Amino acid sequence: LRVVVLVSGAGSNLQALIDAAAGDGAPFRLLAVGADRDGTLGVERAATAGIPTFVCRVPDYLTRADWDLDLERQISAVDPDLVVSAGFMKVLGPAVLGSHRVVNTHPALLPSFPGAHGVRDAMAHGVRVTGCTCHWVDAGVDTGPIIDQRCVRVEDDDTVESLHERIKVVEREMLVDVVRALAADRSWQGD
Ligand code: GRF
């Protein structure tokens, strides 16, 4: 399976995919990594692994639609089967979503706590169990069909940071499992 990964930050989910793709007989290959900002550790991780990178920053375009079109062009240049949004903190536009199948990972049990602060919002609500979700991306924010979810218990002494770190351990495993599963069963490609 030919995969492009989009990142905005530390890229630990990306790193899990890089490591899994490097294994013998891995069913997927990372063709390129794109970011929406400069200087991300995610892009650095990709470069270290010898994966081509690109940066597509919204403020560099006249309109958000131009950004969407150029992001689509950069993704399409490597002709992927699948785009993985792994901590990519921008809502994708119609150009990208119209030409690519995109999966996203989110650090809460959707449909609860969508948006940029899923971990904080779940804690603020007082949930005792939270987790992570991998889903197909549609035009909404964290709304598309769910592919997989994993649970994480909230401990009494958790902070948003400590909880997010434990979620991310599980999230990385989930994301690798999902990409492997999508590589093994390609029926979604005909959808
Ligand atoms: C992940 O928890 C992702 O779901 C969230 O931000 C985190 C990104 O982590 N939106 P990383 O950049 O993969 O380390």
Image: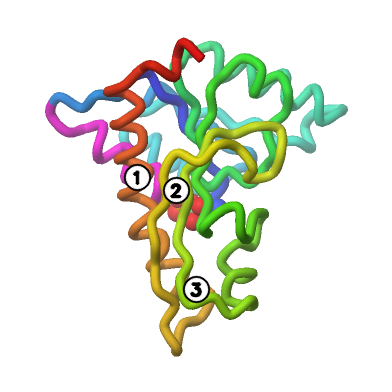
Gap in Å between the C-alphas at discs 1 and 3? 19 Å
Classed neighbour count for the residue bearing mark 1: other residues with Cα under 10 Å, few (<14), some (14–19), many (≥20): some
**How would you classify the magenta stretch by its main secondary structure?**
helix
Q: Give the amino acid type for the residue marked by disc 2 in the picture.
A: Gly
Q: Residue furthest bottom?
A: 157
The question of residue 108 being in magenta is answered with no
Q: Nearer the viewer, mark 2 or mark 3?
A: 3
Is 29 on the left-hand or right-hand side of 160? left
Q: Is mark 2 within 8 Å of ligand 1?
A: yes
State the residue at coordinates (31%, 45%): 16
Q: Is 44 drawn above or below residue 168 in the view shown?
A: above
User: Which residue has dot 1 on it?
Assistant: 15
Quadrant assignment for the N terminus: top left
Please give the label number shown on residue 11: 2
The one nearer the camera, 127 or 106, is: 127
Image coords of residue 54 (percent x, y)? 55, 28
Query: Taking the image as drawn, is residue 10 in sight?
Result: no
Q: Give the amino acid type for the residue marked by disc 3 in the picture.
A: Glu
Residues tagged 2 and 1 counted as in contact (Cβ below 8 A): yes
User: Which residue has dot 3 on it?
Assistant: 161
The one nearer the camera, 152 or 31, is: 152
State the residue at coordinates (30%, 24%): 28
Q: Is 19 drawn above or below residue 55 in the view shown?
A: below
Q: Nearer the viewer, mark 1 or mark 3?
A: 3
Is 137 on the left-hand or right-hand side of 15? right
Gap in Å between the C-alphas at discs 2 and 1? 6 Å
Q: Secondary structure at mark 3?
A: helix
Choose the circle earlier in sequence order: 1 or 3: 1
Q: Is 123 drawn above or below residue 109 in the view shown?
A: below
Snapshot colouring = rainbow
Choose the circle earlier in sequence order: 2 or 3: 2
